[in-house]
């Protein structure tokens, strides 16, 4: 009995020790998990802050260059501005690649499913990138299958990103000849279509042994390619991930010295097409014609104030300026505006708070004022955060004048018809009433 008792006590001590070891291991795992989550949050916050801090001055640089393009210049000055603009866009492209790569690696990139016209998207890209091709005496053209459905359901931003990467690479690595963008229906049904998107060039080509590495991160054809043509080696790796996320296939065919074909195959649902009613036609006309309206520009950065005000004034719009959300609320209380362009990160009162407060006051009236976010917050979820606060649309900085004009044309057309208010804005915007001490309304900003 004594021996059995001693053995039992020994086993109990071993169990207690094992339990203590398990608890220690569990505590270490919890600490490791918490540390990993904290590191992930710190990384996300760092990337978001860096993105914002780079995009803010980039908006001033690219915006000023766009304004300069509209002034009288001699041929040499025009070339200098084009070079500066292209260089700034190259820097922005690198920033976007790094952010996209980080989001994909963290599995935080979410695809949209919205109606879009692939035909219009391709036409827009060819028009936009034709100047790059012309600068190298290269012909850029598109061949689109006549059976392509008018409207598809998918993520046009990511489809555009895939094609843009293919086209810009083709232009970069082609010294003479042409770059041909093709869209072909592989198979079609009543509700879905399988498409092959390809970009064919007459460039330097890629050796077969290098082709399998092209879609890997930080990889190019060889070291001399990076030295001669530049690039991070991230573009095609990101494109591959995007195509796979969209459920497609991607590949390359190349003949060194004669050219390459980069392609992907993607499956899209076909969007139901209805005829444009008269109201939509009117909006389309206004989006293309001269703009009219009184705009409140809410922006705290002095350079971006000037750039945006000059752009808006050049479009024929009247502009008032508010340098923070509190002054914006004061202006809105004292004047009628057709539309608000709202920055998000501002002192005193930010754009989210100002929008929520205005929407709560707006419930008493009948007209919903369009509020468009114009912000350097361009990370995943920032657009949704703006819409949740009560804004109607979103435009990321740096702002392109043509895109801003198109967006304003659409919303000013809607504004003239008086938007209806949501039935329960407090539920939608998820905020409690906020009380502010209003300052006087700002004076009109001189946009001439």
Image: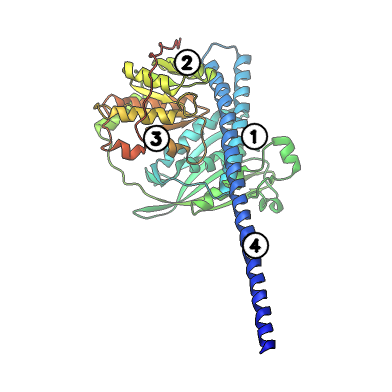
| Residue 347 % position (x, y) | 50, 24
Query: For numbered disc 4, what is the local secondary structure?
Result: helix
Residue 389's label in the rendered image is 3
Left or right of 96 in this view: 405? left
Task: Classify 10 Å Cα crowding around label 3: few (below 14), some (14-19), many (20 and above).
Answer: many
| Residue 298 % position (x, y) | 44, 22
Query: CA gap, disc 3 to disc 2?
Result: 28 Å
Of circles 3 and 2, which is in front?
3
Q: Quadrant of residue 57?
A: top right
Residue under numbered circle 2: 310
Task: Classify 10 Å Cα crowding around label 1: few (below 14), some (14-19), many (20 and above).
Answer: some
Residue 176's label in the rendered image is 1
Residue at the front extreme? 2
Of circles 4 and 2, which is in front?
4
Q: Is residue 360 above or below residue 338?
A: below
Residue under numbered circle 4: 24
């Amino acid at each position: 009995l004594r021996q059995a008792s001693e053995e039992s006590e020994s086993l109990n001590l071993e169990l207690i020790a094992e339990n203590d070891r398990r608890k220690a291991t569990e505590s270490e795992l919890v600490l490791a998990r918490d540390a990993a989550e904290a590191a992930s949050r710190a990384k996300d916050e760092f990337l978001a802050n860096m993105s914002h801090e780079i995009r803010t001055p980039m908006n001033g640089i690219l915006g000023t260059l766009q304004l300069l393009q509209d002034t009288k210049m001699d041929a040499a000055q025009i070339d200098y501005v084009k070079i500066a603009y292209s260089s700034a866009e190259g820097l922005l492209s690198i920033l976007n690649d790094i952010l996209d790569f980080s989001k994909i690696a963290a599995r935080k990139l979410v695809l949209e499913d919205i109606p879009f016209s692939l035909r219009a998207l391709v036409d827009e890209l060819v028009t936009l990138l034709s100047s790059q091709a012309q600068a190298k005496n290269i012909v850029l053209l598109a061949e689109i299958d006549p059976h392509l459905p008018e409207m598809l359901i998918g993520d046009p931003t990511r489809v555009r990103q895939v094609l843009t990467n293919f086209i810009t690479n083709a232009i970069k690595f082609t010294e003479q000849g042409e770059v041909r963008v093709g869209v072909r229906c592989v198979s079609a049904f009543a509700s879905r279509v399988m498409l092959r998107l390809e970009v064919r060039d007459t460039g330097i080509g890629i050796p077969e042994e290098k082709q399998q590495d092209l879609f890997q991160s930080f990889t190019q054809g060889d070291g001399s390619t990076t030295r001669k043509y530049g690039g991070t080696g991230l573009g095609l790796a990101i494109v591959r991930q995007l195509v796979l996320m969209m459920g497609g296939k991607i590949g390359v065919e190349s003949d060194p010295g004669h050219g390459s074909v980069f392609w992907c195959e993607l499956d899209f649902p076909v969007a139901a097409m209805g005829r444009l009613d008269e109201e939509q036609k009117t909006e389309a006309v206004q989006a293309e014609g001269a703009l009219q309206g009184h705009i409140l520009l809410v922006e705290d950065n002095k350079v971006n104030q000037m750039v945006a005000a000059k752009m808006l004034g050049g479009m024929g719009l009247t502009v008032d300026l508010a340098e923070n959300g509190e002054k914006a609320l004061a202006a809105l209380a004292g004047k009628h505006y057709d539309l608000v362009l709202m920055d998000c990160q501002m002192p005193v009162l930010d754009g989210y708070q100002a929008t929520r407060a205005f929407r709560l006051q707006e419930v008493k009236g009948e007209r919903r004022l369009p509020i468009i976010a114009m912000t350097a917050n361009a990370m995943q979820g920032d657009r949704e955060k703006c819409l949740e606060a009560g804004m109607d649309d979103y435009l990321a900085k740096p702002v392109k004048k043509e895109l801003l004009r198109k967006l304003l044309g659409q919303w000013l057309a809607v504004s003239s018809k008086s938007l209806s208010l949501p039935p329960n804005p407090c539920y939608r915007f998820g905020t409690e009433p906020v009380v502010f001490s209003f300052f006087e309304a700002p004076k009109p900003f001189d946009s001439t």
